[in-house]
Image: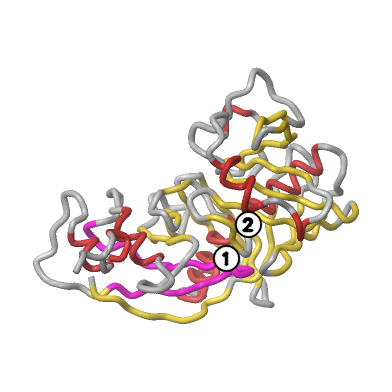
Amino acid sequence: MRNPPEPHRTAAAALATTAGIGYAAPMRLEFWKMQGLGNDFVVFDAPPDLAGRPVDARWLRALADRHTGIGFDQALMLEAPRDELTSVYYRIFNADGGEVEQCGNGARCIAALTHARNPALGAEIRMASPGGAVRARVLDDARVSVDMGVPNFDPRALPMEAVAELPRYPLRVDGREILIGAVSMGNPHAVLQVDEISSAPVARLGPLIERHPAFPRRVNAGFMQIHDRGRISLRVFERGVGETLACGTGACAAAAVGRRLGLLDAEVDVDLPGGRAHVSWPDAQSSLWLTGPAIIVYTGSIEI
């Protein structure tokens, strides 16, 4: 009988081989399964030996497997705050095990969890991640708003190879030229406008845009249909994950690109496969806010 393929190793076995880390005995990791608009997460406090350290991608891939693990789009690891102004520092890992800079729906879930664990903090939560500081407001209806900062259209911020900053960029994909908007929301996004969201070529073009040579660190690919100045539909092929039911930073990126092109107003409803988010961006100098539900689905534990 052949050995099973590497991705199906147990989470415990994979973590035990994390570079430079050894465990004398098994330990139990408590976690929360959370979701925002169907974008799902495993959230856990960093084990002492992992705080601030590299995490073995094999362990994360084993946990992300929806048949043999827990299953998630992203894993969110909570660490102690790094300054007195924030309540938590968090790190984000995609289902392929890669660490990324920011996650809008993940930030909303962490704010909801932080508030639930310590209501005395109040409804205004300050957090930090590799993508920078994040302010959040926990609302009364199971929704959370997060300040995603000012969208950065400088191609160097993504990074993206371009000779100058443009409202749209031509990109050679699948034998033809398409036009994309590009923006950093703390992580990189390319946004393609389409006529009909249901038939958008997400499965075909998404991977090609994600790994296009113009994006040396890869990119999230958004497919946006504009219904009117206050509503869009969106599907996102996420870097290191594939198409997801929702992408918070993708919703922000699409609204920002559409507003910059003069096609959208300051308040935009974003219809995603997993539900509706709301994006508010008053003007180019102001922060963009993302609002939507953040739900604890269940709690659990796994021995590692």
Numbered mark located on residue 248 in the image: 2
Residue at left offset 54%, top offset 30%: 213
Q: Is residue 262 visible?
A: yes
Q: What type is the residue that disc 2 sits on?
A: Gly
Region of the chain picked out in magenta, as a range = 29-49
Numbered mark located on residue 105 in the image: none
Residue at left offset 39%, top offset 55%: 81
Gap in Å between the C-alphas at discs 2 and 1?
9 Å
Identify the mark nearer the N-term, 2 or 1.
1
Residue sitting nearer the eye, 152 or 126: 152
Q: x%, y% of residue 274?
A: 66, 69
Query: In the rendered structure, are the residues bearing label 2 and label 1 in contact, judged by CB atoms less than 8 Å apart?
Result: yes
What residue is pinned by disc 1? 39
Q: x%, y% of residue 106?
A: 53, 61
Quadrant where the N terminus is found in the figure? bottom left
Residue at left offset 59%, top offset 46%: 220
